[in-house]
Every structure is written in structure tokens, then in C-alpha cells.
Image (cartoon, helix red, strand yellow):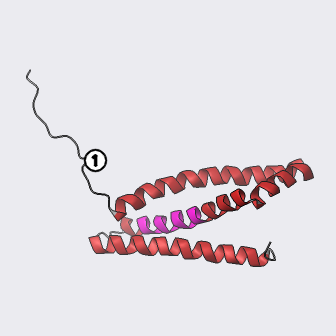
Amino acid sequence: MPATERPLSPHIQIYRPQITSGLSIFHRITGVALTLGTLLLTWWLVSAAYGPEAFATAQAFLGSLIGQLVLWGFTFAVFYHLANGVRHLLWDFGWGFELEQLRFSGIVMLAFAAVATLVTLIAGYSLAGGQ
């Protein structure tokens, strides 16, 4: 049987990057980040059960610059994943499939995640007394 010349399936090397594909990939990345962040939260809670020394270690890490950056990233991932989940829910109802609507909803989703993260962080620092 002779080999036939069949077209290859389209892949990332053929298509130009688009906002929708980038947001989709980032949605998967934030899903993994949420899993890792949940493990971090579990470590923090378990350390509280283990006693003052273990809890002090967890608090020291989370209070460090690296720990704060991780928490900020986790907070953004929560809001990004939430907003994109709502966006997907709207798609399930058949809303927002036009190209302009896809771009607009992607930008709104990113803006929501950024603003909600900033509001949460400002509120958190205010409640903590600016520590």
C-alpha cells in the first residue's frame, strides 16, 4: 500500500499566537498554581496544629518577600481562574463567541483579576495593620 500525502494536523508552529489561546494556556497554568497554593495552605494549617515552632516557621516563610510574592500570585490565580470560569460558563450558554466579544471578555477578565487582587491585598494589609 503506497503512502499518501496527507496534511498534518495544525499545531502551535503554524498558528500566530492569539489572546484567546494565550488566556487558555494561562488558565491551565493557574489551575496548577491553585493546586500548589492549596498544598501551601495545607502546610500552613498543619503547622498550626503541630505547635508554635512549626507555625512560626510557616509564618516566617509566608511573611518573607518570596512568601508574599507566592501569596500574591496565588491570589491572582484564584481571581483569574474564577473570572475565566465565569467566561466559560457564559460560553456554555452560547454567549460571547464572536471574535470581538472573545477579545473583550478576555481583557475584562484580566482586568477583573488584577483589580480584585489589588483590592484583596490592600484590604489584607489594612486589616493586618500594614505589617
SS at mark 1 in the image:
loop
Residue lying at the far top in this picture: please name it.
1
Q: Is residue 74 magenta?
A: no
**Count of numbered marks:** 1
Q: Residue at x 10, y 34 (%)?
A: 5
For the N terminus, the image quarter is top left
Q: Residue at x 36, y 58 (%)?
A: 21
Q: Residues within 10 Å of mark 1 (few under 14, many from 20)?
A: few
Q: Amino acid at mark 1?
A: Gln
89 above or below 30? below
Q: Residue at x 86, y 49 (%)?
A: 54
Magenta stretch, main secondary structure, is helix
Region of the chain picked out in magenta, as a range = 76-89
**In this view of the protein, can residue 15 be seen by the observer?**
yes
Label 1, on which residue?
13
Residue lying at the far left in this picture: please name it.
2
The image shows residue 105 at horizontal and vertical percentages of: 39, 73
